[in-house]
Image (cartoon, rainbow, N blue to C red):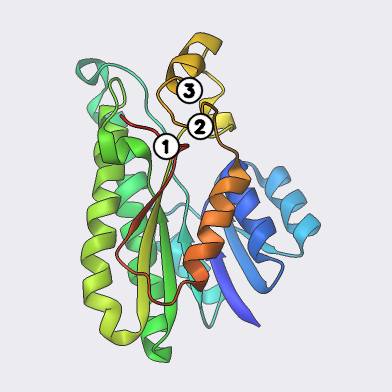
Amino acid sequence: MKTAVITGGSGAIGSALVEEFAKDHRVVFTYLNNREKAVSIAERYGAEAIRCDQTNDLDIKKLLDTINSCDLLINNAGIGSVGLFTDISYQEMHKVVNTDLLGVMSVTKSVLPLMIREKNGCIINISSIWGVYGGSCEVVYSAAKAGIIGFTKALSKETGCSGVRVNCIAPGLIESEMNSHLTKGEIGEFVSGTSLGKIGTAKDVALAARYLSEAEFVTGQVLGVDGGFWG
C-alpha cells in the first residue's frame, strides 16, 4: 500500500485530506496542539497521528522515523495572521514565515530523499489565493503563501528528472475554523468577487489534491480552488 504523509491533519482541510487518501493509502498525518481531535480522526479513518512542530528539526526526524517510504506528501499545516502589517510584532512575523514557508521546506527536504530513492513521488503544497493576489491585513501570511508558490515551481524543475512531481493548490475562502472570525458581511463581500457566488468546502480541496496525485503529466502548477475568484 502506498504511504501518504499529510501535515496539519486535524484541521478542516487536513481532516478532509486524511479522509480522502485513507481510502487507498497508509496515511500518517501530523498535528500540533489538538491531540484529542487528532486521535479521533486517526481512529475514524484508520490513519496514524503524530505530533510534529514543523519548525522543529527533532520533531521532523521523529516523523521521518515513523515512515520508511513516502509516495505522497501534502504540506497542509500552517497558521494565519490578521492585522495591519505595521501592527504585527517581529515575533509573530517570524512565527508565520517559519511555519508556513520554512516549515514546509524543512518537511519536504526531509521526505524528498525517500521519493528520489524510488524515482517516484508526488508533493502537493497548500498555498492560498492570498499567495496569488495578496491580501490586505494578511500581508505576512500572503508573503509566506506566495513563497510556497515559488518553492513549488522551482522544486518541480529540480525533481522532475527523478520522477517526483510537485504541485500547489491555492484555496479560496473555505468553510473552516481558520475563517470562523469572518463576519457575514466579510463573507458576502468575498463571495461577490467569485464567479460561482459561494464559498468552498474542505472536500473541494481534497478532491483537487486527489486529481493532482493522479495526474502524472502535471507538475509545477498552481491549481486555484477558489470558485472563480477574480481578485
Residue 107, position as x, y percentages in the image: 39, 63
Q: Quadrant of the C terminus?
A: top left
Which image quadrant for residue 133? top left
Residue 153, position as x, y percentages in the image: 24, 62
Query: What residue appears at the point 60 percent right and 80 percent down from the top-left corner?
Result: 2
Q: Which residue is mark 2?
A: 196
Q: Nearer the viewer, mark 2 or mark 3?
A: 2
Q: On screen, 131 above or below 105?
A: above
Q: Amino acid at mark 3?
A: Val
Residue 145, position as x, y percentages in the image: 31, 43
Query: What residue appears at the point 37 percent right and 47 percent down from the top-left corner?
Result: 127
Residue 221, position as x, y percentages in the image: 32, 60
Q: Which residue is mark 3?
A: 191
Q: CA distance from mark 3 to mark 1?
A: 10 Å
Q: Amino acid at mark 2?
A: Leu
* Local secondary structure at mark 1: loop
* Circles 2 and 1 in contact, beta carbons < 8 Å: yes
Answer with mark 3 or mark 1, whichever residue precedes in sequence.
3
Which residue sits furthest front? Answer: 195
* Local secondary structure at mark 2: loop
Left or right: 197 as drawn, with respect to 203: left
Tag count: 3
User: Which one is nearer the viewer's eye here, 102 or 55?
Assistant: 102
User: Which one is nearer the viewer's eye here, 87 or 6?
Assistant: 6
Q: Which residue is mark 1?
A: 228
Query: What residue appears at the point 31 percent right and 26 percent down from the top-left corner?
Result: 138
* Residue 94 seen in the current view: no
Q: Quadrant of the N terminus?
A: bottom right
Q: On screen, 168 above or below 203?
A: below
How many C-alpha atoms fall within 10 Å of the one at disc 1: few (<14), some, or many (≥20)?
some
* Residue 211 seen in the current view: yes
Which image quadrant for residue 13? top right
